[in-house]
Amino acid sequence: MAIFGVQLVVTMVMASVLQKVSAHFSVARWLLSYRLTRYLHPTDEELLSVAGLQRVNGQKKGKKGKDRKDDDKDSEFMVPKNLELQLDVAAVHPNDMIQLHYYSEYQWLLDFSLCALIVYVVTEVYYYLIPAKDEVNLSVLWCILVVGFAAKILLSLTALYFRGEEAVGERSLCLTAGFLFFFLAMIVLIADEDFLEFGLEPAYSSFNASAHTFLMDQGLDSSGPASKLMFKLSLALWCGFIGSFFTFPGLRLARMHKDALKYCSERPFLKTLLHISFISPMFIVLMWVKPVSRHYFTERTWPGIPEALMSSDAFDTTRLVLIIVIVAMRFLLMPHYLQSYLNMAPEKLKNLRKEAGKISNVELQKMVARVFYYLCVVTLQYLTPLMLCLFSALLLKTLGDYKWSSYVGAESSVEIVNATATKISPLPVGNDILESSQQFSLTLLSLKKVFTPILYRGILGFMTWWLCAVLNLSSAFVLFGFENICQEFKLCKCF
């Protein structure tokens, strides 16, 4: 308990809430229930009535030994594509969502993320009132788990496009986007620190020197764990995968944003919020461009203001606050985006009327029902990038040793540690349990010197910036060329 302190109690309470309360009340279930309206697919009787047809008398039930598919063929009939159908509307009920694709993953991700956020807030308040000494910050573990769950869901959603022979266009788009973002990341990583201030250079220097000292203390002769080229190449590969994973979420967001603007044409305030929410990641991207952000906020003095607008530490904290505000804004606007997605059902029928020929009743019903069936998939495509951006920013704040109190004058104590000053002489190892425990503690202390706040600031800062940049680039690029991309890669099946 001395190692974990109050955090262990908070973690156990939230784990109990997640296990027992979520079965009866779920924020994820409440968020979609009674707040959205869905369109019901037309029944066979409605289709026959609108088309002016009569059901052909046939076998209603199959005999023993016959395949059930024979009954489906008997009930299938053709109707004109230009039918004037009016779809019935119904509110989304909790019982309706159980059958949806990826519903369990959506519920788990959102409920667990909320619990992790509560644990993080309680831990931050506790550390503000009682500064930490040697306690292990369990909120970091919660944040890492959320990032892991979100990444796993994004991977599984992307893997859907690599199964079967029909999703050739989707696979081509994912691979193309991955390679494009990989090369873009290589260009970004060679940019000067005076332009894009990620802090990767001091992060690599700190890690390489500290790791070399740690290996020498363990009796291993090494000049360092990795070269700078391999360090940046690994980051570029990660950037390529993220670009591939964010391609279809960006494509989906652009389509929903375009439709949402159409449905709120008579609500100028909501329309303005949608525009701000869509371009908001660009503000985060610019906050890491030193000539247009840090220079004007922390170095330049303005007329009538004797000092700079804020200190350097306050500027670093402002980046994190901006990410949190933007994620909160997009979360609040999520029902409007999801409703614009559900409104695709009548839009599909409207586009179908422009075509000539006939379509079977089963295909028409599937076309309408498929929109609601993939609601949770679309919700995950909207939420998982936001969860990754939010919790990577929280990890950056905690592991990078930033302070929320930097606005009131508190300064960060992080400095670039000299590798020669971190060398710790190991204790002699004996057979006694106490000596072994001391040696283990000393090894952990030495290992902690390797993963310094400078390292976390560089890597997590770059990762957070890249997540926001890819989310903005993929959605903005797709918005302006949405129709061309769908035609080029034949994405009509998914969109």
Image (tube, grey):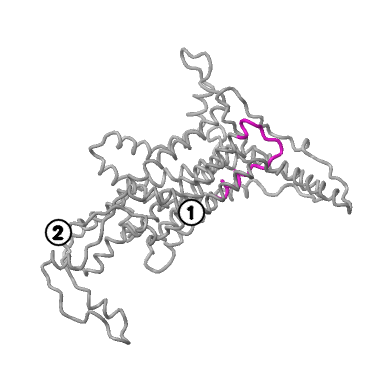
Q: What kind of secondary structure does the magenta stretch mostly adopt? A: helix
Which residue is painted at 62% across and 47% down in the image? 231
Q: Left or right of 164: which side holds 416?
A: right
Mark 2 element type: loop
Q: Name the residue tied to disc 1.
A: 108
Nearer-N-terminus badge (2/1): 2
Mark 1 element type: helix
**Residue 432, numbered circle:** none
Q: Amino acid at mark 1?
A: Trp
Q: Amino acid at mark 2?
A: Glu
Quarter of the C terminus within the rendering:
bottom left
Quarter of the N terminus within the rendering:
top right
Q: Residue 422 occupies which quadrant of the picture?
A: top right
In the rendered image, the vertical position of residue 394 relative to residue 240, given as above or below: above
Numbered range of the magenta stretch: 126-145
Residue 206 on image: x %, y %: 68, 39
Q: Left or right of 478: which side holds 186?
A: right
Residue 330 on image: x %, y %: 40, 41
CA separation, marks 2 and 1?
Answer: 40 Å
Q: Name the residue tied to disc 2.
A: 84
Of marks 2 and 1, the one in the foreground: 1
Which residue is painted at 57% across and 39% down in the image? 396
Instruction: Based on the picture, tell me whether residue 457 belongs to the magenta stretch.
Output: no
Q: Observer-nearest residue: 385 or 104?
A: 104
